[in-house]
Every structure is written in structure tokens, then in C-alpha cells.
Image: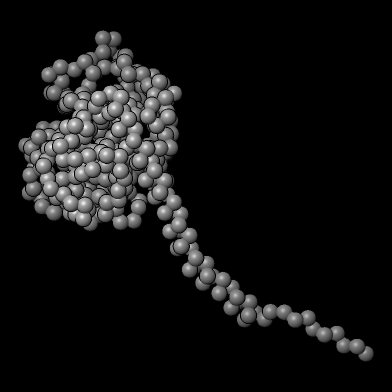
């Protein structure tokens, strides 16, 4: 009788050992894959900021000044004004700029604001150049149908209203006096508004030029990143850069600061990163608004300078250095090794 030989196979112990080895290899490989993906996302973010910086330079070349940071609260921000310079002419042409804070027809103003029917084609559009791929909320659409984006422009070292002089608490020194020393972007004010408009909280400042940046374009921040607020909270408008108060950042707090943002006139709730609402500057009557540069990149934020270059700023940058980088006419002496 011929006996059949048993077929060779794996024992249960051998199979478990192989599975364990494969699991260990995957565990070792996964961080490297994630790091490679983040490196690619960070490179895309740098490219976006490079495009924004070049668009700002081209705008200045064609118009003799830098684009406005905002046109009052509701009639356009830098994100609208540079659209032709990032190959978005059709979207720019869809923006209706005839709105005014003092409309002759009464209700017509609401129709022509950022949320009005005349401009929702733009504010509901997703502009890839304004989105950081590291932010999981980039380009989200809120219940108001608007798209939220990740880049903001430099409003200097005090607050969004660019107050000339008052005390603002900063992490390194709660009693520091922040003095506005110029910024590359400003609020040019609500259309058709006169001096009485200041009582409404609208600031009206002239646009800046590259020549007015006496601190040097390579030592002055132009634009940086912001983290979009939680999509579960429609009252938090950080990242809604079609709206004036959300279109800027200030250097009063450092990159990815543990100190909260403030958006007293936007009604933002406590989130991560934190945001305080209804804050008032000491000695001021208007609600305090300032946003810090923030990102999902480990260790810091990307920012483009006023010469078009893009740099990575660590969270550990000295707050005095960061505030100096936010000014255009501060006269501070900065060396490249200070940041």
C-alpha cells in the first residue's frame, strides 16, 4: 500500500509570527509615508503663498500701490482684488463692486455685499490657490454657502483696526504697549463714507506702496496662514477671508500662539485654536479684533514676504522679532539669523 505524504504547510505559530512581522513593518513605514505626504502638502502651501506674493507684486506694478486689505467690512478684500493676477479673471469679473455703506436705494446695499446675491458667485467659489492642503477644513462650504480659505495678509503689530497706540496683552509681557508702525495692507474704508463714518467703526487708511516699506521688503511680512475654524460652528468666522475682519493677521501674537485670537465684532466662540469674542482694547470703545498666523504644519507657519519670497517661521520666534516683521516703518534692525 502506498502511503500519501502530508502536504507541507504553515503552523499556526509560524503564521502568527509572519503577521506580527508584517504589522511591525507597516508600523515603521507609516510615519515615513505620513511625513512624505505632509512634505508634499507643505510644498503646495509654499507654492500657494508664492503665487499670492507674486500676484501682490504684479498688482503693485500695474496700479502703483499694494491691493487694499479690505474695502470696509463687506465690499471686497485682497482675495478679490488679486484674482486677475492668479489667472482668475472670470471670477474677478463676476464680482460686483458697486456696493456702498450709504446706498441711495436703501436695501440695495445688502444685495451688493459679500453675502448679497450679486456676489455669491465669488464667495461660494473654491479658489485652490487660497487653500492649504494640510488643513482638513480648507475650502469647506458653510451654511451661508461661502467658502473658507487659509491665507491672510499682514495688518501690522496692533489689531485689525490698526489702532495707533494702546496696550494689548501679549504672552511674553501682558503690559506691553503696542504701537502701530505701518503695515503693507489696510482697510481703505467703506465706500462713500465721510468722517462721520468713523463713529460706525469704519477705518479709512490709504493703501501702501513698496516704496513706503522703509524697513525693507525682505524684512516685512506680506501674507501668512490661518487655521479655519471648526465647521460645526457657523459663528466662528476665522478663514472667511471674503469678509474684511477675517482677511488679515496681526503680529501681536506669534505663530501658532497659545494665546487666543480675538474677534469681538464677528461673534466667535471658544474653539481650538481658541478665540475670544467681545474683547475691547484698553481705552478703546470698539471691539478688539486680531488673528494670529496659524497652521497645521509642525513647528511653525509659512509666510511670504513683501519681496515675494516664502519663508518658514518657527513657533519659537521671539515675539519682539515677529512684531518687527509685521511693521513697514518701525526702523527695527533684524538679521536673518533672528528668525
Work out whether residue 300 can be spotted: yes
Residue at the spot 27% in from the left edge and 39% down from the top edge = 307
Work out whether residue 240 can be spotted: no
Residue 147 falls left or right of residue 293: right
* Image location (x, y in percent) of residue 148: 37, 37
* Image location (x, y in percent) of residue 135: 39, 47
Frontmost residue, 218 versus 178: 218
Residue at the spot 85% in from the left edge and 85% down from the top edge = 4
Residue at the spot 12% in from the left edge and 34% down from the top edge = 163
Frontmost residue, 284 versus 324: 324
Picture quadrant where residue 13 is located: bottom right
Quadrant of the image for the N terminus? Answer: bottom right
Q: Residue furthest top?
A: 104
On screen, 74 above or below 283? above
* Image location (x, y in percent) of residue 257: 23, 51
Residue 212 falls left or right of residue 145: left
Residue at the spot 18% in from the left edge and 35% down from the top edge = 213
* Image location (x, y in percent) of residue 199: 13, 23
Residue 206 falls left or right of residue 39: left
Q: Residue furthest right?
A: 1
On screen, 127 above or below 224? above
Amino acid at each position: 500500500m502506498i502511503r500519501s505524504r502530508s502536504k507541507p504547510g504553515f503552523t499556526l505559530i509560524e503564521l502568527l509570527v509572519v503577521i506580527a512581522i508584517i504589522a511591525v513593518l507597516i508600523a515603521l513605514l507609516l510615519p515615513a509615508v505620513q511625513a512624505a505626504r505632509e512634505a508634499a502638502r507643505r510644498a503646495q502651501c509654499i507654492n500657494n503663498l508664492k503665487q499670492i506674493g507674486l500676484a501682490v507684486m504684479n498688482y503693485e506694478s500695474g496700479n502703483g500701490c499694494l491691493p487694499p486689505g479690505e474695502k470696509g467690512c463687506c465690499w471686497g478684500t485682497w482675495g478679490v482684488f488679486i484674482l486677475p493676477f492668479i489667472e482668475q479673471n472670470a471670477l474677478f469679473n463676476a464680482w460686483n463692486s458697486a456696493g456702498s455703506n450709504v446706498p441711495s436705494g436703501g436695501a440695495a446695499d445688502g444685495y451688493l455685499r459679500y453675502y448679497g446675491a450679486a456676489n455669491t458667485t465669488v464667495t461660494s467659489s473654491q479658489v485652490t490657490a487660497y487653500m492649504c492642503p494640510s488643513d482638513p477644513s480648507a475650502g469647506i462650504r458653510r451654511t451661508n454657502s461661502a467658502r473658507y480659505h487659509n491665507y491672510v495678509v499682514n495688518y501690522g503689530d496692533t489689531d485689525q483696526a490698526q489702532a495707533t497706540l494702546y496696550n494689548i496683552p501679549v504672552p511674553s509681557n501682558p503690559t506691553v504697549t503696542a504701537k502701530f508702525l505701518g503695515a503693507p495692507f489696510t482697510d481703505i474704508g467703506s465706500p462713500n463714507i465721510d468722517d462721520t463714518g468713523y463713529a460706525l467703526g469704519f477705518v479709512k487708511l490709504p493703501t501702501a506702496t513698496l516704496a513706503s516699506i522703509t524697513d525693507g521688503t525682505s524684512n516685512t511680512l506680506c501674507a501668512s496662514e490661518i487655521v479655519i475654524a471648526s465647521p460645526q460652528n457657523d459663528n466662528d468666522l476665522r478663514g472667511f477671508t471674503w469678509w474684511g475682519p477675517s482677511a488679515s493677521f496681526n503680529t501681536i501674537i506669534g505663530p501658532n500662539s497659545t494665546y487666543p485670537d480675538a474677534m469681538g465684532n464677528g461673534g466667535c466662540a471658544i474653539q481650538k485654536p481658541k478665540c475670544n469674542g467681545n474683547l475691547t482694547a484698553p481705552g478703546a470703545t470698539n471691539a478688539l479684533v486680531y488673528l494670529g498666523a496659524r497652521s497645521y504644519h509642525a513647528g511653525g507657519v509659512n509666510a511670504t514676504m513683501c519681496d515675494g519670497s516664502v519663508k518658514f517661521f518657527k513657533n519659537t520666534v521671539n515675539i519682539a522679532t515677529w512684531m518687527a516683521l509685521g511693521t513697514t516703518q518701525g526702523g527695527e534692525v533684524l538679521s536673518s539669523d533672528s528668525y
